């Protein structure tokens, strides 16, 4: 076995095997019918016009081919198709794309393949086609069931369409369903927020993402902020919603994610546990680990060209799709690891630090002691976990780690 083969297999030159982190795949769809005023994702308005499906499919496959050297011999545990609005693209598009991916990478036996869908861009026939293509988890961007709130958020669907979309997804055979619900909306009361949650629960999803509206830079809401609820109301909504979800059998496993037993998002869990993920598509980000020819653990972050037209142009001129990349330095690793792991309410196995960074545990412990002393973090030999106070003030906790 050559040194290159050793590195590719995740082994040191001395023969010691290093198990690389689990691998998932993120696929980005950059188009939406209309840009929502709160959205800071890489999404671009297409109206309801025809999208360049054939060209984008070719680009995604070529993009993946360019990444394979970083994932040779590793199987995919999860695939997540996000956007934008992935449900703007046809079932035939995903049928072909997933078949091409399977030709190049092994799929874990119980692989979870998630697609985000907008209730305003779906119909029964499409749901049937998505399920037949191999997509087995659906994430519906409902946000609210109140038509006035949906209008304020710039959504293109109504509350009735959201209910219908869930019924269509169930009829198509989806038995793993997430519903996104946003709270802290313009003019929203505690009663209205809880009513949204009750309507979501009536639809019996396996997973609910329950998160507060934030005014992100480079969005319309940031430039022209709407009138949001007072701080006390926001706290009441959060507390009452959390209590209601737990009574309904949903466990909070991440700051804004609740799931029935066994239905936590596998792609998101891999992300929070500092696993590896390939990213293909316009604006997609990836994070890959490898062992170099000298046995040194390396972690690289890379990102792709953001503008859809520019991304497609890269296919034609064969320049490749990478817009930038960088190695994560040893000094950056403690904060990078904790920014992910400490979002999990139950914490992570303390051994994941060394398993997913290649660094000795003592390096991390030195960074964490101040947060432990402040009561923001609890650390044992088995687990690394934010305290309830640490979850409430996660930014302060992370700032404490970064300032060491």
Image: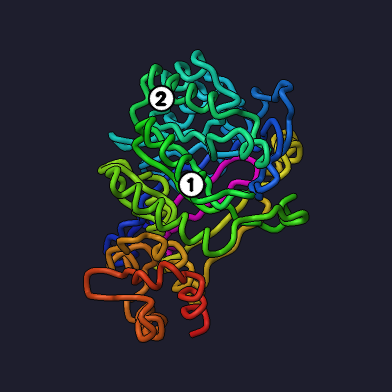
The residue nearer to you, when weighing 225 against 316, is: 225
* Residue highlighted by disc 2: 134
Q: Is residue 129 left or right of residue 146?
A: left
In this picture, which residue range is highlighted in magenta?
276-293
Instruction: Give the main secondary structure, helix, strand or loop, of the magenta stretch.
Output: strand
In the image, residue 382 sits, relative to residue 269, either above or below, namely below
The residue nearer to you, when weighing 26 against 107, is: 26
User: Residue 163 placed where, x, y %?
Assistant: 48, 26
Q: Is residue 385 left or right of residue 291?
A: left
Question: Which residue does the image show at 27% across and 60% down from the upper left?
Answer: 17
Q: Is residue 291 magenta?
A: yes
**Residue 294 in sight from this viewpoint:** no
Q: Is residue 381 magenta?
A: no
User: Residue 121 placed where, x, y %?
Assistant: 60, 24
In the image, residue 371 sits, relative to residue 194, either above or below, namely below
In the image, residue 58 sits, relative to residue 23, either above or below, namely above
Question: Which residue does the image show at 53% across and 49% down from the upper left?
Answer: 183
In the image, residue 301 sits, relative to residue 39, either above or below, namely below
Q: Earlier in the sequence, mark 1 or mark 2?
A: 2
Q: Decide: few, some or many residues near mark 1? Use Cα within 10 Å; few <14, some 14-19, many ≥20.
A: few
Question: Which residue does the image show at 51% across and 28% down from the upper left?
Answer: 162
Nearer to us: label 1 or label 2: 1
User: Residue 377 placed where, x, y %?
Assistant: 35, 75
Question: Which residue does the image show at 47% across and 28% down from the upper left?
Answer: 98
Mark 2 secondary-structure assignment = loop
* Residue highlighted by disc 1: 191
Mark 1 secondary-structure assignment = helix
């Amino acid at each position: 076995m050559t040194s290159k083969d050793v590195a590719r297999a995740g082994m040191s030159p001395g023969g010691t095997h290093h198990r690389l982190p689990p691998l998932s795949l993120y696929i980005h769809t950059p188009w939406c019918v209309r840009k929502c005023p709160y959205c800071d994702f890489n999404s671009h308005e297409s109206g309801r016009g025809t999208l360049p499906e054939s060209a984008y499919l070719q680009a995604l496959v070529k993009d993946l081919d360019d990444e394979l050297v970083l994932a040779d011999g590793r199987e995919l545990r999860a695939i997540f198709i996000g956007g934008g609005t992935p449900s703007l693209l046809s079932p035939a598009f995903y049928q072909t794309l997933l078949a091409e991916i399977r030709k190049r990478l092994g799929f874990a036996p119980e692989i979870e393949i998630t697609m985000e869908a907008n209730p305003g861009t779906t119909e029964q026939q499409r749901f049937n086609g998505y399920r037949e293509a191999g997509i087995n988890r659906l994430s519906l961007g409902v946000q609210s069931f109140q038509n006035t709130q949906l209008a304020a958020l710039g959504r293109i669907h109504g509350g009735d369409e959201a209910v219908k979309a869930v019924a269509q997804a169930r009829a198509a055979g989806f038995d793993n369903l997430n519903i996104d619900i946003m709270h802290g909306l313009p003019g929203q009361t505690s009663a209205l927020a809880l009513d949204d949650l009750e309507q979501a629960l009536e639809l019996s999803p396996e997973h609910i993402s329950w998160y507060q509206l934030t005014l992100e830079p480079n969005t319309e809401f940031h430039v022209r902020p709407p009138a949001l609820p007072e701080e006390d109301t926001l706290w009441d909504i959060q507390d009452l919603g959390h209590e209601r979800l737990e009574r309904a059998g949903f466990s909070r496993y991440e700051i804004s994610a609740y799931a029935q037993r066994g239905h936590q998002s596998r792609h998101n869990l891999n992300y929070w546990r500092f696993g590896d993920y390939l990213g293909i598509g316009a604006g997609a980000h990836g994070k890959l680990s490898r062992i170099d020819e000298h046995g040194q653990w390396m972690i690289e972050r890379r990102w792709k060209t953001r503008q859809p037209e520019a991304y497609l142009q890269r296919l034609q001129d064969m320049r490749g799709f990478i817009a930038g990349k960088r190695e994560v330095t040893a000094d950056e690793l403690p904060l990078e690891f904790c920014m992910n792991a400490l979002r999990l309410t139950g914490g992570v196995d303390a051994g994941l630090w060394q398993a997913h960074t290649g660094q000795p545990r003592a390096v991390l412990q030195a960074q964490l002691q101040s947060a432990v002393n402040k009561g923001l973090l609890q650390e044992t030999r088995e687990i690394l976990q934010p305290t309830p106070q640490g979850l409430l003030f996660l930014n302060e906790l992370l700032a404490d780690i970064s300032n060491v």
